[in-house]
Amino acid sequence: MKFAAHTMATPDRDVVQAAQLFRQVGFDGIDVILQEDYRCALRPNISDTEAARTGARIRELGLDVPCLVPYVDGFNSPSETVRLRAIDNMRRALDIAAELRARFVRLLPGMSVVTEERTMSTTRLIRSLQVLADEAASRDIGLAVENHMNTAIDTASEMMALISNVDHSSVGVLYDPANLSIMGESNDRAAYDLQRGAIRHVHVNDYQKIEGGLKVDRHGFRQCLLGKGEGKLTDWISWLVRDGYCGFVTAEYGGRWFSDILPPAETGLVNELAALRSALSVAMDGAD
């Protein structure tokens, strides 16, 4: 198991500068955002040449790129125009990921829908993902569908139904236990067990519920340092170790969203890596 940091941690740096910091702290990889209007991201219109150059600079620092992280969600739209645009945007993301030599591209499972539209929404989502799965396979890249708020998929069981219906070896789960808890999964272990065989990549952060006077995000929780909140980091890592997970676990340190709550990345990421290493050590001891 290796550990990466996410470019959401460093809104005041560009991607290469973030990679330099992550390497200095001791991380093994960098998850890179693909989005307009954010400094620590690659732009969707980046040229292949520049994407390849960025990937080379990251590798020169000794880091891998486990995952490219676009923000595309129109795959289940009732508008064919919107769906096709979303698919095209993800094709471009896959091209950029190939130039970076990223292992996975994060995929959001559609836009949030009202209950009465869910059946048709799910059908459209499955069809879009099947098209993209073939595109990903042709580039030898995996699609990691993330448990994420404000999407068409709210639970671990819904995620696994989606993965099963897409039925493609290139498509798996981006396991985010904090997101699952925030979305209402009350049993961390049960949610993990549902998804365990499909996990391709992992994001972790810690969180606290709303208290009066505290800055919170729109989901009723605020982020905090790993090990300081309600998240069960040691359990999450232990389950992965016991199941033989050998991929990356990425610390989603939310400097982009919580700069007035979290310490600066230069110090906060030191805590995140120490917490991850401590959890891994406990897990490895328990596995002996």
Image (tube, helix red, strand yellow):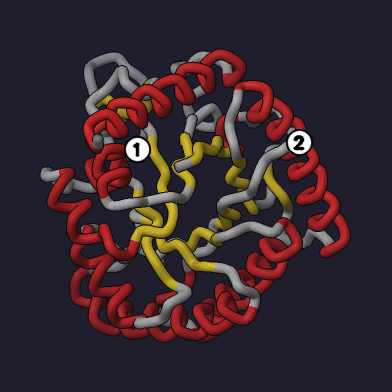
Element at label 1: loop
Disc with the residue nearer the chain's start (2 vs 1): 2
Tell whether 154 sits left or right of 74.
Answer: left
Report crowding for label 1: few under 14, some 14 to 19, many 20 or more residues within 10 A (C-alpha): few
Q: Residue at coordinates 77% horizontally, 61% vertically from top-left?
A: 45
- Where's residue 135, x and y in %? 59, 81
- Residue position for label 1: 218
Q: Amino acid at mark 1?
A: Arg
Tell whether 198 sits left or right of 37.
Answer: left
Q: Amino acid at mark 2?
A: Leu
Tell whether 13 sits left or right of 9.
Answer: right
Relative to 74, does residue 45 appear above or below in the rendering? above
Tell me how many marks there are. Answer: 2
- The quarter of the image holding the N terminus is top left
Q: Hey, which residue is sitting farthest front in the picture?
A: 288
- Where's residue 78, x and y in %? 41, 81
